[in-house]
Image (tube, helix red, strand yellow):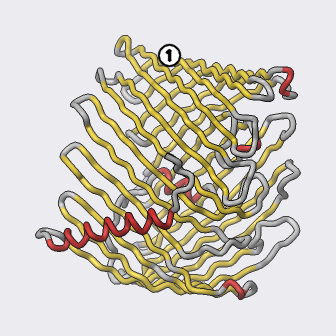
Amino acid sequence: MQLKNCPFQKSFVLLSAVVFVFLLCAVAQARVVTQIMPTLIISEEYSDNFFQSADNEQEEFITSVGLGFSLGFIERRYEVYLNYNPEYLYYKNLDNRDGLEHNASLDGAFRLTKKTNLNTNLAYTTRDEKQAGESWENSAFAALDTQLTKRTSAYISQSYTNSFDQQIRTGDYREHNVNRTAAGITNQFGEKDRMGLNFTYAFDDYNNADADEYTEYSPSAFITYWVTPLNGISSNISYEKTDFDNSTDDIDTYRGDLRYIRSFSRRLNGYVQYRHTYSEREIGDHHIYNPSVGFEWDVTEDSGINLGVGILFSQWDESSGNEDETDPFLELDAYKVFNFSPRGSFSLTASSGYGEYNEDAASLGYSIYYQAGAQLNYQLLKRMSSNVFASYQRDEYSETLVDRTDNTITVGAGLSWLARKWLRFNLTVSRDDFSTDGDQRGDYTENTAFLSVSLIPAQPVRLKSDPTRQDLQDTLFR
């Protein structure tokens, strides 16, 4: 089956029709709570470098007026929410872009059986103009998880996006389609002992031929086994086949790691790890040797801090034209919310990694990345809250013909005032500073401000009301 040619809009309409029929059936049932919530949002957005350019710093003010509604159906075994928010945009300088946009989303959480859950999301916008400075995305997502036996669980997920956004490699705005299909099974054969298999299929397909297009297949397996209550081992192995649509430099990558774990408490472990990556490429094979030592602090199932230090020994075939390198490497995977008082909290997220390519800039080759960010929230008054946030991203593309490093620093602050239960004011200001030593893209600095007034009669119920790591990263890394 060729997934690359599946039209998103047809899939969206079909799935929407199925869910609409479900909703009609749901309304006819008893014990269904129905809620409808009208909304009015007026906003003003300012940018002093709308095109994020080094030599074309276009100032722009955008006024938006949106009148919409949310419709929810809540029952013991499912929740479904439909949001429709049309808005009219007024541009001060680029007035040829003025117009009405329609934005719709559909979220659902279904408990199909006692042991099987389905979560879905659809989002669609009519903003299909392909112009620099503008970004839009249509998306579809579905995830099914089930408990096969007392100790065995499985999942399958599918995500698809059709988007128009700024390309990392060149800074140009391009339209492309990203698909990711994943499936896996996990067996819990002890209190902390687990093993499982996973498989991923993904592609990035541009509307016009582009060097960043690729297709990827990746099976993998993992195991964690505690030999004694204080001593354990874990291991991961994977194979990844990456085909570049507009290049003959396809990649076959084999990865494996082995970690010795020492438990110091119920939530704190230390580890010593060795990771090896071997890639077969037309330009020459590549070995990466990565010993490291560190600790992992598991706070909850989805939050904790993993911090390690190690060395990357990168060894290339002479025919590749790339030079061998030895570099220190900081191993990061952290997400934690610190509630330091009834009024305040501090959120932290950080990660690092390396591989034969960056999924957002595949043609730039082998890369190392670091990203870290934090946000401080504080309740100033009963109805007024504030936040301050900052983030740093670094991408190193180390192959000799590329030899490029990108750095992005973002800082900002926000203020929210709930004047009435139905009236909210929000103000956010931020500054983005991007620098690169590559010759395909220039540096830029952008200062932005966003002010909105929201009129909502009451606060509607929403799926996943608690902030997630992805919510935080969407705010910090742009």
Helix, strand or loop at mark 1: strand
Name the residue located 20 percent from the left edge and 68 percent from the top edge. Answer: 26
Residue 17's place in the image compared with 150, above or below, is below
Looking at the image, how many numbered discs can be counted on the residues? Answer: 1
**Looking at the image, which is closer to me, 470 or 136?**
136
Relative to 390, is 3 on the left or the right? left
Residue 308's place in the image compared with 24, above or below, is above
Q: How crowded is mark 1: few (under 14 residues within 10 Å), some or many (20 or more)?
A: some
Question: In which quarter of the view is residue 418 placed?
Answer: bottom left
Which quadrant does the C terminus fall into? bottom right
Relative to 321, is 256 on the left or the right? left
Name the residue located 65 percent from the left edge and 44 percent from the top edge. Answer: 214
Residue 368 in the image: state x and y as whole percent: 70, 37
The residue to which callout 1 is attached is: 260
Residue 195 in the image: state x and y as whole percent: 38, 24
Q: Can residue 394 be seen here?
A: no
Name the residue located 47 percent from the left edge and 77 percent from the top edge. Answer: 417
Residue 314 in the image: state x and y as whole percent: 75, 24
Residue 173 in the image: state x and y as whole percent: 72, 64
Residue type, numbered disc 1: Tyr
**Looking at the image, which is closer to me, 149 or 293?**
149
Q: Can residue 207 be seen here?
A: yes
Question: In which quarter of the view is residue 228 placed?
Answer: top left
Question: In which quarter of the view is residue 198 placed?
Answer: top left
| Residue located farthest toward the left when viewing the structure as drawn | 30
Name the residue located 39 percent from the left edge and 66 percent from the top edge. Answer: 14
Relative to 77, is 46 on the left or the right? right
